[in-house]
Amino acid sequence: MNVALHTTLRIVAWTLALALVALPVVAVLNGWIGAERWPLRTLRVGGELKRVDEQKLRAAVLPYARKGFFAVRLEDAQAAVAKLPWVEHAEVRKRWPDVVEVRIVEHKPFAQWGNDRLLSEDGDLFPIAGAALPKGLPRFDVDAPETRIGDVVALYNEAKELFAPEGATVRTVSLDRRGSWSLTLSSGTEVVIGSQEAHLRLDRFARLMPNLMAQKPLPLARADLRYTNGFALTWAPAVPASSSTPHMQGQTQT
C-alpha cells in the first residue's frame, strides 16, 4: 500500500468518525431527535400581565417549545410573542432543564388613534388587533402625519385641564389635513377650534364657559371658536322635538 492511499484512507476514517460524532449533535440542535429526552415542560411568565391573554401566549410559544431544550429557537419564539396584542417588548429565554421563561412589557394605552390603532403612554402607535378596549379612553381622529402626535397629546392635556373645573372630560380630539382642530366634551358639546391660535381660543372659551352656561339653562350643542371677538353657540332644544310642534336649535354669537 503506497503512502498516498494510506493517507486517503486515514482522512476518510477521520471524516467518518467526525460525522458519527457531529450528526447526533446536529440532530439534537435541529430537533430531529431528543425532544422527548430533553422536553420543555414549564412556561414561566415574568412581568405584570393585565391585558395579554395567557392562553394566546402559551399558543404562541408551544410550536417552538415542542422541539426540546436544545432545538428551541428563542428568537423565533420571541418574535411570535411580540406579535400578540398589547405586547410592547418581549424576551424569551430557557433555563435548564425544562423551563421557558417569557418576560413581557405591556403597552399602556393612552388613547384610541383612529379606528384601528391605540396610542401608548410612551407615544407609540400599535394595532388594536381585536383586543378589548379599556373604558374611558379618549379618541384621537387625526388626518395628519404621525409627527403630529406630540401636538395632539398637548392639546388634549390642555383641554382636559381647562374643562375639569366644569366637571367635563374630553372625549375626542380631531385634527384634519388642513390643520383645523375640534373636540367633543363628555357633555356632548362639539367645540370647533379652527387652525389659528388654537390654544388661545380654547383658553378664552374655557374661562368664559361658566358664565355662558349660567346665562342660558339649555344644553350647549356646539361652540364655534373661529371668531376674532367671540363665539357662535348652538343650544340644544329644551324638550325633544315632536311631529306636531317643531323645535329649532337656537344659535347665538357672543
Image (cartoon, grey):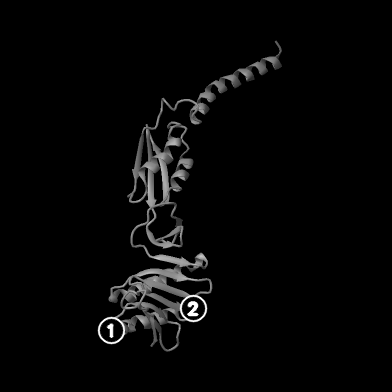
Which residue is at the front of the view, 86 or 72? 86
Q: Residues within 10 Å of mark 2 (few under 14, many from 20)?
A: some
Q: Give the labeled residue for mark 1.
A: 214
Query: Which residue occupies 49% across, 68% down?
Result: 148
Is residue 2 shown left or right of residue 194?
Answer: right
Identify which amino acid the numbered label 2 is placed on. Answer: Ser
Which residue is at the front of the view, 153 or 140? 140
User: Residue 120 sits in which quadrant?
Assistant: bottom left
Identify which amino acid the numbered label 1 is placed on. Answer: Ala
User: Residue 92 sits in which quadrant?
Assistant: top left
In the picture, the quarter occupied by the N terminus is top right
Marks 2 and 1, how far apart in space?
28 Å
Which residue is at the front of the view, 154 or 233? 233
Is residue 122 shown left or right of residue 22?
Answer: left
Q: In terms of sequence position, does the residue under pointer 2 or pointer 1 come before the other? A: 2
User: Mark number for residue 195?
Assistant: 2
User: Mark number for residue 248?
Assistant: none
Name the spot of residue 18 as percent of width and height, x first.
Answer: 56, 23
Secondary structure at numbered mark 2: loop
